[in-house]
Image: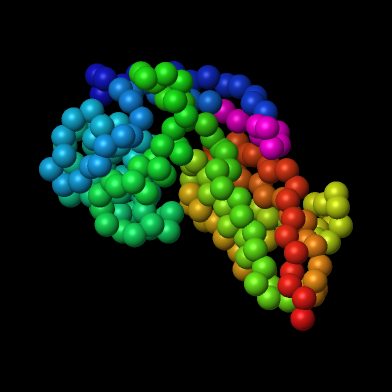
Amino acid sequence: MKNIKYIFVLAVLFVAQGAFAQITVSSTVNSSFSADLGLGSRGEQVKALQTLLSKMPNIYPEAYVTGYFGKLTENAVKKLQKENNLDQVGRVGPKTRTLLNSLLISKNTDSVVYEVPMVNVLEASSNSATTGYLFWTTNKLTTSDLWYGTNSPLDTAVATKVSDSSKSFSHSHNLSGLATSTTYYYIVKVTDERGNSATTTEKSFKTASQ
């Protein structure tokens, strides 16, 4: 991989909406993703795509970085799209490009930073009096833990806990048996394959009335 060099940097970062203990891994590539890619595409954008996918063994176990978008790359893109609830079209269009760029934080035109783990999207909703739905995405494959309860600040020692041991870029939970017209507070913790974890600040949602 003559166009790629790896630099590992350990840091503790604080995110505006809550403190996250993070490890920053910097990989120099030519650019972030700006072009549509599909079968037959060639060039540096394809190399950057394959380099990113190669960091995900369950998505792209072959890990070839050739600069040519062939069937193996197409299959890997489909798996990535499936993991993130996108249409499994096997090509990189606007939605998939947004996902890919969410995994990359640009330092300048020549480098990007991979941060692990980090919660990119965190949403909660309740469409009925006794149920709720929570959804979040991360910038790397992680497992997750969710705590929720009716008291704030939330005490994870006594709050209800739900865990997901599968490694994924997206996680969701359907909650049932909730109290009517009640505010619920929740915290999410994500953990990557190296045991590095990040915990969100406390969030809340309210169930509907009868």
Name the spot of residue 77 as percent of width and height, x first. 30, 49
Is residue 63 highlighted in magenta? no
Residue drawn 68% across and 61% down? 162
| Residue 199 percent coordinates (x, y) | 68, 42
In-image side of 205 versus 139 (left or right) = right
Nearest the viewer among 155 and 131 is 131
**Residue at left offset 36%, top offset 53%:** 81
Tell me if I can see residue 163 in this picture: no
Residue 204 higher or lower than 40, as above or below:
below
Q: Quadrant of the N terminus?
A: top left
Relative image position of residue 119 (x, y in whole percent): 58, 43
Quarter holding the C terminus is bottom right
Q: What stretch is highlighted in magenta?
A: 15-23
- Inspect the magenta stretch and tell me whether residue 19 lies in it: yes
Q: Can residue 127 be seen in this view?
A: yes
Choose between 2 and 30: the one closer to the eye: 30
* Direction from residue 99 to residue 201 in the image, left or right: right
- Image coordinates of residue 92 in percent, x first then y, are 28, 46
